[in-house]
Image (tube, rainbow, N blue to C red):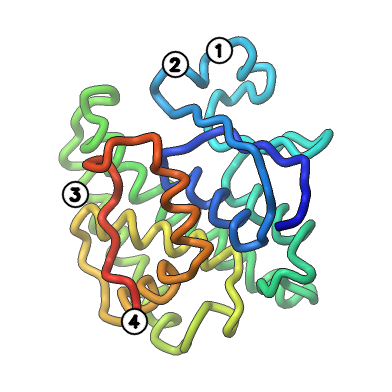
Amino acid sequence: MSDSSITVWGVGTSRTLRVHWALHELGLKYMTEAIQARTGETKTDAYTRLTPKQKVPFVQDGALGLSESAAIAHYLFETYGADAGVWRPETPAARAASDEWCYFIMTELDAHSLYVIRRHDDLRAIYGAAPEAVASAREYFLKQIGAVQARIADVDSCLFGDRIAVADILLTTVLIWANRYGIPLSDEAMAYCRRTIARDGFQKAFEHNYAHLPAAEWPVLPNAAS
């Protein structure tokens, strides 16, 4: 692994998993501050000075402090990915194609759909139950995932060829999340997910990300690809 000055704050969620996975794909050494959401650990004065958002994940790399899992993964791939065997956009057109998928995944699938389900079903004791909103979010996810499943059906490995991209990290975590909620996914989507989670980088990151939680709280993964 390469030497680095990277510290990651946050474990135990799909969004923190993205950062740990990116780091393991890149073969980078890093330190972990294993704080968790909704424990009070993100509300301390020290952490608030790092990120007033009081959210995880957060990354410090030298003088740079950065939040938002997708932004962090992009930064890591762009900064450390030249010789790591990962996919990075090298032209404006490739960047636009990457951005299109990443923005779609983060907004339409994550924020507008799955996080509504999480807030008002999994975390209803905190945010309040809203069964109609949850049902609507599930329906919306199923509509939007159709475009993704059509793309996945045409790829043999990852979204942009045989090298993993940030979009693959984001999409895989979303598919794991949807599978956990019992949302039906196509055979092609499940096959894609099994391929990406079989990667050594994912397996190491998954164990690291959830090691501080009871085993019963770990997400159940689709069977890994053979």
Question: CA–CA distance between discs 3 and 1?
Answer: 35 Å
Quarter that holds the N terminus: bottom right
Residue carrying label 3: 135
What residue do we see at 27% from left, 22% from top?
Answer: 126
Question: CA–CA distance between discs 3 and 2?
Answer: 30 Å
Quarter that holds the C terminus: bottom left
| Front one among 194 and 175 | 194
Determine whether the residue tagged by mark 3 lies in a helix, strand or loop.
Answer: helix
Q: Earlier in the sequence, mark 3 or mark 1?
A: 1
> In this rendering, is residue 30 above or below 75?
above
**Left/right of residue 14 with respect to residue 185 in the rendered view:** right
Q: Are marks 1 and 2 in contact (CB under 8 Å)?
A: yes
Determine whether the residue tagged by mark 1 lies in a helix, strand or loop.
Answer: loop
Residue carrying label 4: 226
Type of amino acid under label 4: Ser
**Left/right of residue 2 with respect to residue 188 in the rendered view:** right
Q: Residues within 10 Å of mark 3 (few under 14, many from 20)?
A: some
Q: Residues within 10 Å of mark 1 (few under 14, many from 20)?
A: few
Question: CA–CA distance between discs 2 and 4?
Answer: 41 Å
Residue carrying label 1: 44
